Amino acid sequence: MADPLFKVGVLGATGFIGAPYRAEIRECNEAGIVAVCARRKDLLARAAEEDGAQLATSDWQEVVEHPGVNFVIVGTPDALHHEAVLACAEQGKHLLCEKPVGMNAAEAGEMWGLYRDARPALAHFVPFWTRMVRVFEIAREMVAANELGEIVSTVFRWQNPRPADMPLTWRDDPMLSSAGTIADVGSHAYDVVRWIMGTEASSVLAHGETLTPSKADLGEINLGEALDWGRDGTKAAGSSRQGGTVDYASVACRYANGAVGTYLLSHATFLRKHLAPELELHGTSASLSVDRWSGEVILVRPDQEKQVVARAPDEGFGNRFSRWVFPSLAPAIRGEEGSNAHPNLEDGWIAQKFTDAALQSVETGRWVSV
């Protein structure tokens, strides 16, 4: 077998994000998983066997420093990204870093600066997958074609309800999570809206709370285990407490081009999707609604009935590494000139400025500059 172009090391290899990523990479001829890292030894041994990895370790530095690794995936909790990404830059490793890329914009900006200035160039990808959903691509194409005129107002609803009895995970811990739901889904929502509109937020006013009641604290379990807990009819005993991060937020936004917007962001059990379109864009010539759940993109012009301009039901992403990650990064890894159209650490930093400002506004009750 030929030496693969992508020699992969995975940090957070057994988590809710790392496990499906590894499964997709195993299907790719251009990649091989060399090293895996996780804190849970029981899950780590199984992962190494599945991947045929040379190294299985609980020490992330061993992965980053491994001479056989040229591409590192950072899929750990938010608080563990910064140090690892800086080490990846120092070791000359190409990178995929989960969002939010750091605990705050200062960390994110430092990461972006190191990769931006790296010589020779280092490839970097931040998985803002929402851009790859077809209905949002259609919206971007229509905005670029000026079918809506000048965008005046936006509404984005991201409601991802978690089961009421789901135990706590690291996402409920403010020492590990950048900004709870604001950073988790708010970074996706803001990234795709600014990508569609071609403008950034200038200031925000936000309200946030933890709406979900107390949940079981079972210690260090991953999100997949938390979602599965109790489905077999049994529930282990454990202490109970309320999460320490925001699981609901509403964010008013002013954009640099003069438009205004609203974001509703929630993991709370009681706010359910499917009731309204995910995204609304209101322009001087027409309005557009975009809904990945129904797959409908609807255009409304003044004094006209609504027109369904597209039906593109969400059929899943398929293999994200073969479709987007590896094709985007392969030129740089070969030392060739490549496109920078994919989401990267700069986009991660821009999104983090927005989520930082929203969290600060929650805490102060005031408008905050982005």
Image (cartoon, rainbow, N blue to C red):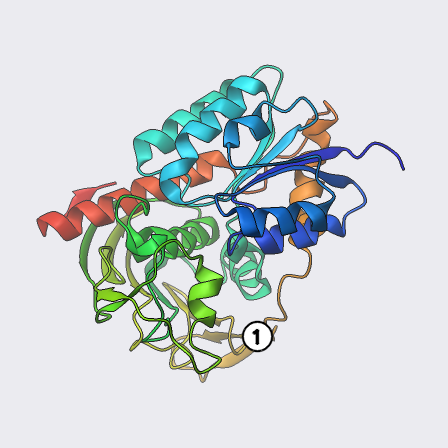
Task: Identify the residue at image location x=58%, y=56%.
Answer: 132
Q: Residue at x 48, y 35 (%)?
A: 345
Left or right of 336? Residue 124 is: left
Q: Position of residue 280 (x, y in %)?
A: 39, 68
Q: Residue at x 49, y 63 (%)?
A: 224
Q: Does 339 sit above or below residue 29?
A: above
Asked which quadrant contains residue 222, the reply is: bottom left
For residue 289, say whether it is visible: no
Residue topped by disc 1: 309
Residue 11 is left or right of residue 102, and the answer is: right
Query: Quick one: SS at disc 1?
Result: strand
Q: Nearer the viewer, residue 117 or 44?
A: 44
Task: Using the image as rendered, state which of residue 252 and residue 351 is in the foreground.
Answer: 351
* Relative vertical location of residue 138 with respect to residue 237 in this rendering, above or below: above
Q: Is residue 110 visible?
A: yes
Q: Residue furthest right?
A: 1
Task: Please identify the quadrant where the C terminus is shown.
Answer: top left
Residue 307, how many percent across, how many down?
A: 52, 80
Q: Residue at x 18, y 45 (%)?
A: 360
Q: Position of residue 148 (x, y in %)?
A: 45, 63
